Amino acid sequence: MRTSDKPIYVTQPYLPPLEEFIPYLENIWESKWLTNSGPFHEELEKKLADYLGVGHLALFANGTLALVTALQALRITGEVITTPFSFVATAHSLLWNGIKPVFVDIHPETFNLDPEKIEAAITPHTTAIMPVHVYGRPCDVEKIQKIADIYGLKVIYDAAHAFGVKFRGKSLLSHGDLSTMSFHATKIYNTFEGGAIVCPDAKTKNRIDDLKNFGFHDETTVVAPGINAKMNEIQAAFGLLQLKHIDKAIDKRRKIDAQYRKELASVKGILIPPLPAGTVYNYAYFPILVGKEYPLTRDELNDKLRRQGIFPRRYFYPLISEFPMYRGLPSAALSNLAAAKKIAEQVLCLPIYPALENEFVKKTISIIKGK
């Protein structure tokens, strides 16, 4: 296959040189310690916490299990306010815990949960708010926390996109009662599959560590109906290797982001959301909005790019609230979610990842320009 014939997707995992990974595998084979908080697992927890600027971090087999366990760790019940504009795992984690999702509209400029709409959705059954830092763009953490404090609610951030993001000089992951992360292969930092929960203190981390290991506190004591959500040693080893290259990978994403912004800024009908202010960003995604002034609809542009071997994604379309298991909820009514519906029908995320060759960036730009 020629380089120009390769399909180009929104993202592809960064894979360090294989020869760098071999010593980690040899170490695992020699020690025969494959999982259950092995040495690479423990090392990665410490190094990630240090890199991200957080005090305590618990690794998980994947980001969905991290969400499910975060809700269990805080003993969340009843109703939880969340966004319809996210990946389905956000709401699925609530259903897995027997919790009713209550969807609230997003802000049309940030794509995040609109704090001005939250209070109207609070009922006597509301116990928590679960916002999402969509595309790694910070939620209005101060307003959300103020609402939570007034009503005595917990805040769990789905920070699957927010690896390494700093907001006003501190880690974005430090906000809320807990933040969960995803290290899926499509994320800017990955461990094949994987995830984590950022914890405020050692006591909370200890409870989460019990919950992710079937509820075992020690060899003979089970303290809760936990689940098997542990990260294995091969995942952790790959994560340690990824961490060595992450700054270079983010810098490559930054350059692609800058190229898109410069070349597409003058295209009529294409809106590029500005970079979030006061933020050290990670360039996890590059969304554009396809407006009425553009000669093609969003779906027509999507199809045109795909015919040329470029596969953007309509993140997030359709809304979570439109799927069968959610659309019967009163909060799923589209009349309540006007901004989210509009963005979902306009958004298109373009390819952006470290190995993306410049010729494909130029090709994508040229197609959007209609050349």
Image (tube, rainbow, N blue to C red):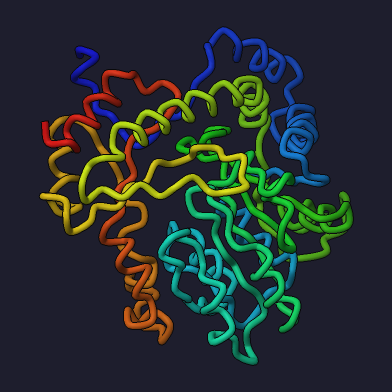
Above or below — where is 64 with respect to 94? above
Residue at 61% across, 41% down:
163
Q: Can residue 78 be seen from the camera position used here?
A: yes
As drawn, is 48 to the left or to the right of 323? right
Q: Which residue is more in the foreground, 197 or 10? A: 10
Rendered-image quadrant of the N terminus:
top left
As drawn, is 290 to the left or to the right of 284? left
Rendered-image quadrant of the C terminus:
top left
Q: Which residue is more in the foreground, 1 or 349? A: 349
Above or below — where is 333 with respect to 73? below
Spot occupied by residue 52 in the image (x, y as percentages of width and height): 72, 38
As drawn, is 331 to the left or to the right of 203? left
As drawn, is 29 to the left or to the right of 296? right
Above or below — where is 362 with respect to 96? above
Q: Which residue is more in the foreground, 14 or 354? A: 354
Residue at 11% across, 50% down:
295
Residue at 55% across, 70% down:
94
Q: Which residue is more in the foreground, 186 or 59? A: 186
Q: Which picture quadrant has residue 310?
A: top left
Residue at 71% across, 84% down:
151
Spot occupied by residue 35 in the image (x, y as percentages of width and height): 70, 34
How many marks overall? 0
Q: Which picture quadrant has residue 106?
A: bottom left
Q: Which picture quadrant has residue 210?
A: bottom right
Spot occupied by residue 276 in the image (x, y as percentages of width and height): 53, 49
Spot occupied by residue 128 in the image (x, y as percentages of width and height): 65, 75
Q: Residue furthest bottom?
A: 124
